[in-house]
Amino acid sequence: MTNIAIVYYSATGNIAAMANAIGEGAASVGAEVRVRRVAETAPADAIASNPKWQAHFDAMANEPLATLDDLEWADGIALGSPTRFGGPASQLKSFLDTTGGLWFKGVLVNTVGTAFTTASTAHGGLESTTLAINNHFYHWGSLIMPLGYGDEHVSKVSGNPYGASHVSRKGSVPDEDSLKACFVQGRQLAQVAGWVAAGKSGA
Ligand SMILES: Cc1cc2nc3c(=O)[nH]c(=O)nc-3n(C[C@H](O)[C@H](O)[C@H](O)COP(=O)(O)O)c2cc1C
Protein backbone atom coordinates (compact mmCIF):
# COMPACT_ATOMS: atom_id res chain seq x y z
CA MET A 1 0.00 0.00 0.00
CA THR A 2 1.39 3.40 -0.99
CA ASN A 3 0.86 6.19 1.54
CA ILE A 4 -0.01 9.63 0.20
CA ALA A 5 -0.27 12.77 2.36
CA ILE A 6 -1.88 15.88 0.92
CA VAL A 7 -1.11 18.89 3.09
CA TYR A 8 -2.64 22.25 2.25
CA TYR A 9 -3.74 25.67 3.33
CA SER A 10 -6.94 27.18 1.99
CA ALA A 11 -8.64 30.39 3.07
CA THR A 12 -11.78 30.32 0.96
CA GLY A 13 -11.99 26.68 -0.12
CA ASN A 14 -10.43 26.51 -3.59
CA ILE A 15 -7.29 24.67 -2.56
CA ALA A 16 -9.34 22.46 -0.23
CA ALA A 17 -11.41 21.28 -3.20
CA MET A 18 -8.25 20.68 -5.24
CA ALA A 19 -6.66 18.75 -2.36
CA ASN A 20 -9.66 16.44 -2.21
CA ALA A 21 -9.47 15.82 -5.97
CA ILE A 22 -5.77 14.94 -5.65
CA GLY A 23 -6.76 12.54 -2.89
CA GLU A 24 -9.36 10.93 -5.14
CA GLY A 25 -6.75 10.48 -7.87
CA ALA A 26 -4.33 8.81 -5.47
CA ALA A 27 -7.06 6.57 -4.04
CA SER A 28 -8.13 5.54 -7.58
CA VAL A 29 -4.91 3.51 -7.90
CA GLY A 30 -5.20 1.99 -4.43
CA ALA A 31 -3.14 4.40 -2.29
CA GLU A 32 -3.97 5.09 1.32
CA VAL A 33 -4.64 8.81 1.51
CA ARG A 34 -4.57 11.47 4.20
CA VAL A 35 -5.85 14.92 3.20
CA ARG A 36 -4.85 17.36 5.93
CA ARG A 37 -5.21 21.12 6.33
CA VAL A 38 -2.69 23.21 8.24
CA ALA A 39 -3.73 25.51 11.06
CA GLU A 40 -5.16 28.94 10.39
CA THR A 41 -2.90 31.59 11.89
CA ALA A 42 -4.62 34.80 10.71
CA PRO A 43 -6.28 36.99 13.34
CA ALA A 44 -10.03 36.52 13.84
CA ASP A 45 -10.86 40.00 12.54
CA ALA A 46 -9.00 39.35 9.26
CA ILE A 47 -10.97 36.13 8.76
CA ALA A 48 -14.24 37.85 9.64
CA SER A 49 -13.57 40.61 7.09
CA ASN A 50 -14.23 38.10 4.26
CA PRO A 51 -17.50 36.11 4.51
CA LYS A 52 -16.10 33.32 2.27
CA TRP A 53 -13.02 33.02 4.49
CA GLN A 54 -15.13 32.94 7.66
CA ALA A 55 -17.51 30.34 6.17
CA HIS A 56 -14.62 28.06 5.15
CA PHE A 57 -12.92 28.54 8.51
CA ASP A 58 -16.13 27.53 10.32
CA ALA A 59 -16.78 24.57 8.01
CA MET A 60 -13.28 23.17 8.60
CA ALA A 61 -13.28 23.54 12.37
CA ASN A 62 -13.54 19.79 13.03
CA GLU A 63 -11.30 18.60 10.19
CA PRO A 64 -7.97 17.09 11.34
CA LEU A 65 -4.81 19.17 11.15
CA ALA A 66 -1.62 18.01 9.43
CA THR A 67 1.02 16.61 11.77
CA LEU A 68 4.66 15.72 11.34
CA ASP A 69 3.59 12.09 11.64
CA ASP A 70 1.60 12.48 8.41
CA LEU A 71 4.80 13.42 6.58
CA GLU A 72 6.82 10.66 8.22
CA TRP A 73 4.12 8.15 7.23
CA ALA A 74 3.97 9.24 3.59
CA ASP A 75 5.71 7.79 0.54
CA GLY A 76 4.38 10.70 -1.52
CA ILE A 77 3.52 14.24 -0.40
CA ALA A 78 1.42 16.85 -2.23
CA LEU A 79 1.64 20.40 -0.87
CA GLY A 80 -0.93 23.03 -1.85
CA SER A 81 -1.49 26.70 -1.18
CA PRO A 82 -3.28 29.63 -2.77
CA THR A 83 -0.92 32.09 -4.41
CA ARG A 84 -0.22 34.98 -2.06
CA PHE A 85 1.75 37.79 -3.66
CA GLY A 86 3.37 35.28 -5.98
CA GLY A 87 4.26 32.69 -3.33
CA PRO A 88 2.68 30.25 -0.85
CA ALA A 89 0.62 31.42 2.11
CA SER A 90 2.42 31.90 5.43
CA GLN A 91 0.09 29.38 7.05
CA LEU A 92 1.54 26.57 4.94
CA LYS A 93 5.05 27.90 5.42
CA SER A 94 4.52 27.95 9.21
CA PHE A 95 3.74 24.25 9.18
CA LEU A 96 6.63 23.46 6.84
CA ASP A 97 8.97 25.39 9.13
CA THR A 98 8.25 22.82 11.86
CA THR A 99 9.83 20.03 9.78
CA GLY A 100 13.42 20.81 10.81
CA GLY A 101 13.59 17.70 13.01
CA LEU A 102 12.47 15.44 10.18
CA TRP A 103 14.96 17.15 7.85
CA PHE A 104 17.77 16.68 10.39
CA LYS A 105 17.05 12.95 10.67
CA GLY A 106 16.73 12.56 6.89
CA VAL A 107 13.24 11.13 7.30
CA LEU A 108 11.89 12.72 4.13
CA VAL A 109 14.77 11.72 1.82
CA ASN A 110 13.42 9.99 -1.30
CA THR A 111 9.81 10.78 -0.59
CA VAL A 112 8.10 11.92 -3.79
CA GLY A 113 6.85 15.52 -3.66
CA THR A 114 4.54 17.55 -5.84
CA ALA A 115 2.83 20.95 -5.54
CA PHE A 116 -0.43 22.62 -6.58
CA THR A 117 -1.90 26.10 -6.36
CA THR A 118 -4.60 28.56 -7.35
CA ALA A 119 -4.50 32.29 -8.09
CA SER A 120 -7.13 34.78 -9.14
CA THR A 121 -5.33 35.69 -12.38
CA ALA A 122 -3.55 33.59 -15.00
CA HIS A 123 -0.37 35.63 -14.72
CA GLY A 124 -0.58 36.29 -10.98
CA GLY A 125 2.11 33.82 -9.94
CA LEU A 126 0.86 30.25 -10.32
CA GLU A 127 4.25 28.92 -11.41
CA SER A 128 6.26 30.99 -8.94
CA THR A 129 4.13 29.60 -6.09
CA THR A 130 4.53 26.02 -7.31
CA LEU A 131 8.28 26.47 -7.63
CA ALA A 132 8.54 28.11 -4.19
CA ILE A 133 6.67 25.21 -2.61
CA ASN A 134 9.00 22.81 -4.43
CA ASN A 135 12.00 24.44 -2.71
CA HIS A 136 11.04 22.56 0.45
CA PHE A 137 11.32 19.26 -1.39
CA TYR A 138 14.90 20.05 -2.48
CA HIS A 139 15.91 20.58 1.12
CA TRP A 140 14.10 17.50 2.36
CA GLY A 141 15.82 15.38 -0.33
CA SER A 142 12.52 14.50 -1.97
CA LEU A 143 12.16 13.54 -5.61
CA ILE A 144 10.09 16.28 -7.22
CA MET A 145 7.31 15.07 -9.46
CA PRO A 146 5.99 17.69 -11.89
CA LEU A 147 2.55 17.19 -13.37
CA GLY A 148 4.26 17.24 -16.77
CA TYR A 149 2.50 16.69 -20.07
CA GLY A 150 2.28 12.90 -19.95
CA ASP A 151 -1.49 12.88 -19.56
CA GLU A 152 -3.64 14.10 -22.42
CA HIS A 153 -5.83 16.14 -20.11
CA VAL A 154 -2.83 18.28 -19.16
CA SER A 155 -1.36 18.52 -22.66
CA LYS A 156 -4.67 19.36 -24.35
CA VAL A 157 -6.86 21.00 -21.70
CA SER A 158 -5.54 22.19 -18.35
CA GLY A 159 -2.06 23.06 -19.59
CA ASN A 160 0.13 23.56 -16.51
CA PRO A 161 3.03 21.06 -16.33
CA TYR A 162 4.39 22.53 -13.08
CA GLY A 163 1.44 21.29 -11.04
CA ALA A 164 -2.33 21.46 -11.07
CA SER A 165 -3.59 25.02 -10.91
CA HIS A 166 -6.85 26.91 -11.02
CA VAL A 167 -7.47 30.53 -11.97
CA SER A 168 -10.21 31.73 -9.65
CA ARG A 169 -11.00 34.80 -11.73
CA LYS A 170 -13.99 36.76 -10.40
CA GLY A 171 -14.32 34.30 -7.54
CA SER A 172 -14.78 31.18 -9.66
CA VAL A 173 -14.37 27.90 -7.80
CA PRO A 174 -12.27 25.04 -9.25
CA ASP A 175 -14.03 23.77 -12.36
CA GLU A 176 -14.13 20.28 -13.84
CA ASP A 177 -10.94 20.86 -15.87
CA SER A 178 -8.92 22.04 -12.87
CA LEU A 179 -10.20 19.24 -10.67
CA LYS A 180 -9.41 16.67 -13.34
CA ALA A 181 -5.82 17.96 -13.49
CA CYS A 182 -5.69 17.49 -9.71
CA PHE A 183 -7.04 13.96 -10.05
CA VAL A 184 -4.35 13.19 -12.64
CA GLN A 185 -1.66 14.65 -10.39
CA GLY A 186 -2.82 12.58 -7.41
CA ARG A 187 -2.98 9.39 -9.46
CA GLN A 188 0.49 10.04 -10.89
CA LEU A 189 1.90 10.85 -7.43
CA ALA A 190 0.60 7.56 -6.03
CA GLN A 191 2.00 5.60 -8.97
CA VAL A 192 5.46 7.19 -8.86
CA ALA A 193 5.66 7.06 -5.04
CA GLY A 194 4.69 3.38 -5.26
CA TRP A 195 7.54 2.67 -7.70
CA VAL A 196 10.05 4.47 -5.48
CA ALA A 197 8.82 2.76 -2.32
CA ALA A 198 9.04 -0.64 -4.03
CA GLY A 199 12.57 0.14 -5.18
CA LYS A 200 13.60 1.14 -1.67
CA SER A 201 12.29 -2.09 -0.21
CA GLY A 202 13.99 -4.11 -2.96
CA ALA A 203 10.65 -5.45 -4.26
C1 LIG B 1 -3.44 38.30 0.63
C2 LIG B 1 -3.75 37.71 -0.72
C3 LIG B 1 -2.79 37.72 -1.71
C4 LIG B 1 -3.08 37.19 -2.97
N1 LIG B 1 -2.10 37.23 -3.93
C5 LIG B 1 -2.40 36.82 -5.19
C6 LIG B 1 -1.41 36.91 -6.23
O1 LIG B 1 -0.25 37.24 -6.02
N2 LIG B 1 -1.79 36.57 -7.50
C7 LIG B 1 -3.07 36.17 -7.80
O2 LIG B 1 -3.38 35.94 -8.97
N3 LIG B 1 -4.00 36.00 -6.81
C8 LIG B 1 -3.69 36.32 -5.52
N4 LIG B 1 -4.62 36.17 -4.52
C9 LIG B 1 -5.89 35.47 -4.81
C10 LIG B 1 -5.91 34.00 -4.31
O3 LIG B 1 -4.72 33.31 -4.66
C11 LIG B 1 -7.09 33.27 -4.91
O4 LIG B 1 -8.28 33.93 -4.56
C12 LIG B 1 -7.18 31.80 -4.54
O5 LIG B 1 -8.03 31.14 -5.47
C13 LIG B 1 -7.72 31.56 -3.12
O6 LIG B 1 -7.61 30.17 -2.79
P1 LIG B 1 -8.33 29.55 -1.51
O7 LIG B 1 -9.83 29.60 -1.77
O8 LIG B 1 -7.85 28.14 -1.41
O9 LIG B 1 -7.94 30.37 -0.33
C14 LIG B 1 -4.36 36.66 -3.24
C15 LIG B 1 -5.31 36.62 -2.22
C16 LIG B 1 -5.02 37.15 -0.98
C17 LIG B 1 -6.08 37.12 0.09
Image (spheres, helix red, strand yellow):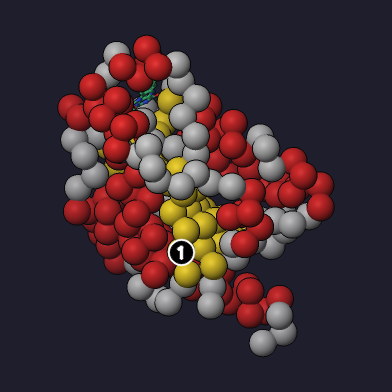
Rendered location of residue 46, percent (x, y): 37, 14
Can I make out residue 165 in this image?
no
Residue where numbered disc 1 is placed: 33
For the point 66% across and 35% down, which residue is it? 97
Q: Is residue 65 above or below residue 147?
A: above
Can I make out residue 173 in this image?
yes
Task: Name the image quarter holding residue 99.
Answer: top right
- Residue 131 lies left or right of residue 102; in this view the side is left
Which quarter of the frame holds ligand 1? top left
Q: Is residue 78 above or below residue 172?
A: below
Disc 1 on helix, strand or loop?
A: strand
Ligand 1 lies under 8 Å from the Cβ of mark 1: no
Q: Is residue 167 above or below residue 108?
A: above
Q: Is residue 137 above or below residue 170?
A: below
For the point 45% across and 16% down, which residue is it? 43
For the point 44% across and 54% down, which residue is it? 35
Rendered location of residue 77, percent (x, y): 54, 56
- Residue 41 lies left or right of residue 53; in this view the side is right
Residue furthest out toward the right: 105
Rendered location of residue 16, percent (x, y): 35, 44
Q: Nearer the viewer, residue 99 or 138?
A: 99
Q: Nearer the viewer, residue 1 or 187?
A: 1
For the point 39% across and 70% down, which residue is it? 27
- Residue 107 lies left or right of residue 119; in this view the side is right
Rendered location of residue 107, percent (x, y): 74, 57
The amino acid marked with disc number 1 is Val
Residue furthest out toward the front: 62
Quarter of the rendering occupied by the C terminus = bottom right
